[in-house]
Image (spheres, rainbow, N blue to C red):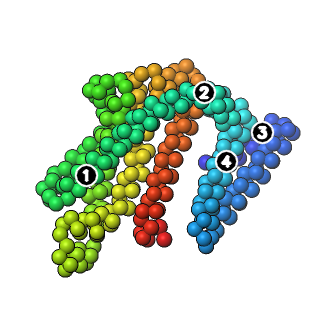
Amino acid sequence: MVALASAYGALALLAAGERGGALAIIVVIFWLSAWRLTAGLAALEPAGRSARAIVSVLVPSIFGLTLLFLWEFVVRGLEVPAILLPPPSAIGAKFAASTPTLWADFVQTYLKAVIAGYVLGCGSGFLVAILIDRSPFWKRGIMPVGNLVSALPVVGIAPVMVMWFGFDWPSKAAVVVVMTFFPMLVNTVAGLNASGQMERDLMRTYAAGHWTTLMKLRLPAAMPFVFNALKINSTLALIGAIVAEFFGTPIVGMGFRISVEIGRMNTDMVWAEIAVAALAGSVSYGLLSVVERVSTFWHPSNR
């Protein structure tokens, strides 16, 4: 898609005249150079951990900057109306000019609703998984219910939660709890059953009880599953809170701002809010990945 967009934009500028043709040649050269550089970095296999970390940051950074450049080039070269798709430069300018508003929306949506609902949903899902682990009846009974609730659309849950908990952030946190509880429950239960029969037999030969086996064997084996749920829920929580704000909220919040500004045709502000949500979700996911790598360094995926 990126190649097709850049090629289409280059052909359009070539047809526009000599100046457009020069710009098209420059941008194609830039795109090919960035592509070659990114492919070369991705093919490297550095020996040290720090070198691998630097490469893992450089590759997506260069790729992302290339996409932004092509976005700017195609939108301006083809004269796409800003109401349909503003260029990144306009979005950046709106971002810088609206920092207080964006920060207030971020505090309302992320720091209040998302974090509260994420902690409650993931924490309760983890604890319930530990409690029902010893009961086959509860596991067989609650897992189908979990799959059912996970399939419920957030647009159906959000209005109900707004009616129950009011228009402020607690109703959005309640939506986040519903969206994050069962993914954590399902993944934790699966992780607790991930340890092998040989390891369990070894614990029994040492006369280890249930809680000792749980703490020494089964919980460590379940950590990759738990972190997988945490990373999935980090994006689900943000999506749920933003969508829930479409159905009733005070005059602040990321979802509120998106719904209002799109009605005013202020697409640059809408994209600025989307950028804030993308940055928040990416940082959350990245921090959880770092904690996972430190906590499960023994796992084959981290070697």
| Callout 1 amino acid | Leu
Q: Mark 3 falls on what kind of element?
A: helix
Tell me the tag on residue 13: 3
Tell me where residue 87 appears, x and y as whole percent.
67, 34
| Callout 4 amino acid | Leu
Count residues near mark 2 (Cα–Cα under 10 Å), then give few for <14, some for 14-19, many for 20+: some
Residue on which disc 2 sits: 98
Choose mark 2 or mark 4, whichever is in front: 2
Count residues near mark 3 (Cα–Cα under 10 Å), then give few for <14, some for 14-19, many for 20+: many
Residue on which disc 1 sits: 127
Residue on which disc 4 sits: 65
* Real-space CA distance between mark 4 and mark 3, rounded to the nearest whole angstrom: 21 Å
Q: Are marks 3 and 1 in contact (CB under 8 Å)?
A: no
Tell me where residue 112 appears, x and y as whole percent.
41, 34
Query: Which residue lies at the image location 20% right of the left edge and 78% below the top edge?
Result: 206
Tell me the tag on residue 270: none
| Callout 2 amino acid | Ser
* Real-space CA distance between mark 4 and mark 1, rounded to the nearest whole angstrom: 42 Å
Q: Are marks 2 and 3 in contact (CB under 8 Å)?
A: no
Query: Which comes sooner in the sequence, label 3 or label 1?
Result: 3
| Callout 3 amino acid | Leu
* Real-space CA distance between mark 3 and mark 1, rounded to the nearest whole angstrom: 59 Å
Q: Are marks 2 and 1 in contact (CB under 8 Å)?
A: no
Query: Which residue lies at the image location 55% right of the left edge and 19% below the top edge?
Result: 264
